Image: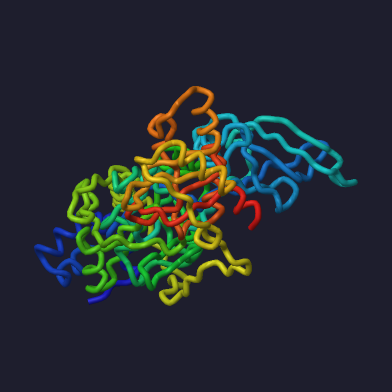
Amino acid sequence: MTKTYKEINQKIKNGEAVVVTAEEMIKIVEESGPKVAAEEIDIVTTGTFGPMCSSGAFLNFGHSDPPIKFDHLWLNEVHAYHGNAAVDCYIGVTRMADKRPFEYGGGNVIEELVSGKQIRLRGISNTTDCYPLGEIDTYFTIDDLNQAILCNPRNAYQRYVCAVNSTDRTLYTYMGKLLPNFGNAHYCGAGCLNPLSNDPDYETIGIGTRIFLGGGVGYIMGHGTQHNPKERFGTLFVKGDLKQMNKEYLRGVNYEKYGTSMFVGVGVPIPILNEGLAKKTAIKDENIITEIVDYGVPRRDRPTIGKTNYKELKSGYIEINGQKVKCSSMSSLYNARKIANDLKEWIENGKFFLNPPAKTLPIDTEYKPMRQTDKIKFVKDLKKKAVICYDDCDIKIVAEKIINQNINHIVITDRENKLKGIVTSFDITKAVAKNKDSLEDIITKKVVTTSDNEPVEVAARKMKKHDISALPVIDDKNYVVGIISSEELLGR
């Protein structure tokens, strides 16, 4: 049994279309089977609402009098991209405000724009004969714009990995704040409601597919950037009229010590054209598998700790090395359900019709990492042998080693070579000045460390952040395997 888009759209027009959400479809297929479901159900609606960093908007301001051709412009002090025509710009959601980094960015500007708030526009130009105005400082609302087009190169990932942190320090990432020593886990996506999970072979999804976007109607322009269907990491390139959208489904977000982004609501209707699609749209959370990935290792190919599924993720806990770890979602399941239900209501009320894609998404796209012509150096390439004293050592021996070997740092370990602390030449100077005679009195026990496979750029940032000049190099069991100092970094 098969259906066509024309038949389904006629049912929508007549008010006869049977529409269910992806969560409702699971129960229907369980009770009646995919064949009966394919006969009875016309459309399955999906939804997802989470941070979608590859998002932004094209804006056209109209011409000033006299005209200006922007070289640089800022919206509420967020630098927007100008490389288009004279008064067009693109504002990306992750661009941070010049004066308020981490607190405000492009995602916040777009949310305020759709809320009807005034936005400050400040622009400068080198001027030309036909564009003589050198600068402008004004305010506008979304109603003052000729066009405001949400244009997102990568949205609605088919699935996401689950992020954890094995290190002994807190990490601030696009997957949120990851606590040390597997203290928590973060994931993203709506699981069985996620659009691409319900049509994993992209039978109905492609160029021209009409979708729910940001509370309004949008369209799929094609596959998104980093589209990786072979690993079930498909993505969508989408666009829509920002003037139709609302702040309920476009929300600016600011991540501590990472930056800004925007939560975007996306919902895709899946027409049940055949029995196969009925079966696919009944996918359960437990059948959507993903990896638990250690973000404590700063490499592109971060190590996989294990596997999990969206049923376990949504339970609030995952298991790592036999231990339960609290797990939280970076996206909103509540809003994903609301999007699926809003889209369902639009279709049932004859306000939304399906659009067959001009071309479906590719299923064989190759995903390639960045080509790097300069070799990245790691700590293991620059580290040197650490000069070590044991934690029960006399302070005089530490001082003698600093003088005899002309060094500034002594790493303190126990008898098994496990890190206990660090002592610097300055610590020894202070000990002499204050008549301290015990190593315990001067040792720094809370030590910032690095590892062999950490890029030297990351190690350098650690030194700058903590205002220190060396990092002990340790392995995953806290054994000291070397030291790297600012001298090695300067000489690289």
| Residue 304 figure quarter | bottom left
Q: Residue at x 25, y 54 (%)?
A: 21
- In this view, the residue in front, 56 or 425, is 425
Residue 20 appears in the picture as rendered: no
Q: Residue at x 62, y 50 (%)?
A: 487
Q: Is residue 38 above or below residue 217?
A: below
| Outermost residue, right side | 129
Residue 437 horizontal side relative to residue 26, left or right: right
Q: Nearer the viewer, residue 488 or 178?
A: 488
Q: Position of residue 168 (x, y in %)?
A: 36, 45
Please state, as top left, top right, bottom left or bottom right, where the C terminus lies in the image.
Answer: bottom right
State left or right for residue 33 relative to residue 114: left
Quick check: 472 above or below 116?
below
Q: Position of residue 125 (x, y in %)?
A: 80, 42
Q: Position of residue 142 (x, y in %)?
A: 58, 37
Most extreme residue toward the top is: 434
Say which residue appears at 40% left-offset and 70% top-offset.
229
The residue shown at (48%, 50%) is 387
How many marks the image carries: the answer is 0
Coloring applied to the structure: rainbow
* Occupied quadrant, residue 67: top right
In the figure, 285 relative to 244: above or below? below
Q: Nearer the viewer, residue 121 or 406?
A: 406
Please tell me which residue lies in front, 250 or 259: 259
